[in-house]
Image (spheres, grey):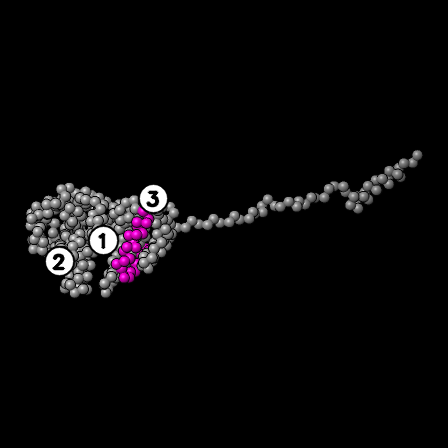
Amino acid sequence: MKVFPYFICLIGLSFFLAGCGGDTTSPPQHSTAPSQQATSDPEPSATPEPDPKDQIADLLQAYYQDLSQEQLDETKYFATTLDKFFNSKDVSRETVAGSIRKGFESIESRSISLDKNSITITSTSAGYMAEFKGMSSVTRTGESSPQAQAFHNLVGFNKDFQITSYEAVSSQASKSRQLAPKQSGNSIEAVAKAILPEFRTARFARTLQYIHPEKGYYLLTHPGAVSVPIHSQKIEELFAQAPWLKKGMTNLSATTKVEEHPEFDCGIMFSKEGSFLNECPPYTGVSELMATLAAYELGSYEPEQIDHAKDLEQYISHALIDTEEAIGFYFGQIEGEWYLLVVDIASYDCSA
């Protein structure tokens, strides 16, 4: 049998199929899966937390603007109970609002400006403490011109940005709110302790040390229908203007407490009894009294005299208030030494 030609045909067929694309090898596969390097959609950026200083600054700005317009929504600004409102503690929001509205009654107009650049914020366990400065201009009922006064306040906020404490800061007080340390041989506590017994006995040998030889001191007295400021470098002027002091102020408290001053009102008098030494708000009692008396032509005070009073007042940072004799002693440091700068026997005299 002749098979050779048949075998040749098979071989030729194989080559023919290979040359015509008969290769059975699978073609390369092209994946349609997304690339692993494809980037995912970016997550939306988180909204930044508001700056507490900005929130507090806006609240204070709105609060003082409301006061300028003599309107107040206490629920907008105050917590239900304030730990402290000036010298009062644990005060309800309603009581604070009532006190503020009562002040509206004696004011014809006012404007208040807050120095936003002065605001400093300190975080506390309960929220925030804000210290700041500003200016107020007030025209009281019956006055023809406004009276300008700087303020320096310390206000506490809870974490919901509600006011929980409100107090004035002395222009010379530190943020620690502590009594000034002893300097250059005397301290505020030592001066106060030295002065009280001498006013009690009307013997002023040591008190003379605490009268500034150039600036002197002011006595506020109430001889008649109005109070009068008297300036002197001599302690004897006390006897000339208040002769009853020669008998001594025998009711002056024997001991002095270093704590908040009592509140005073002619209706209830003092909120507590005793002798209290502490920092006081910026003091302008003498210069304001002079300006008021001059405006009503009840006294002749030149601008130079009022400026002198303002110069002395800027040093005042502490006061000793005695409720038994209803008297205030105001002290300040000048070149490191403590001096008695104002003796006030008029502010707590409610007689006509």
Residue drawn where x is 89% and y is 39% of the image:
5
Q: Which residues are magenta?
A: 92-117
User: Residue 154, image x and y in percent?
Assistant: 29, 49
Which residue appears at 12% of the width and 57% of the height?
Answer: 223
Evaluate whether residue 163 shows in this view: no
Residue located beneath label 1 in the image: 282
Q: Compared to 184, does 304 lie above or below?
A: below
Residue type at numbered disc 1: Pro
Mark 1 or mark 3: whose residue is earlier in sequence: 3
Please check the rendered image and state whether residue 320 is part of the magenta-colored stretch, yes or no: no
The Cα–Cα distance between marks 2 and 3, rounded to whole angstroms, is 50 Å
Q: Which residue is mark 2?
A: 224
Q: Indicate which disc, 2 or 1, sits on the residue closer to the N terminus.
A: 2
Q: Residue 124 got which mark?
A: 3
Quadrant placement of the N terminus:
top right
Inter-mark Cα distance, 2 to 1: 27 Å
Alpha-carbon neighbours of circle 2 within 10 Å: few (<14), some, or many (≥20)? few
Q: Amino acid at mark 3?
A: Thr
> Would residue 225 be visible to someone looking at this image?
yes
Mark found first going from the N terminus, 2 or 3:
3
Question: Label 2 sits on what residue type?
Answer: Gly
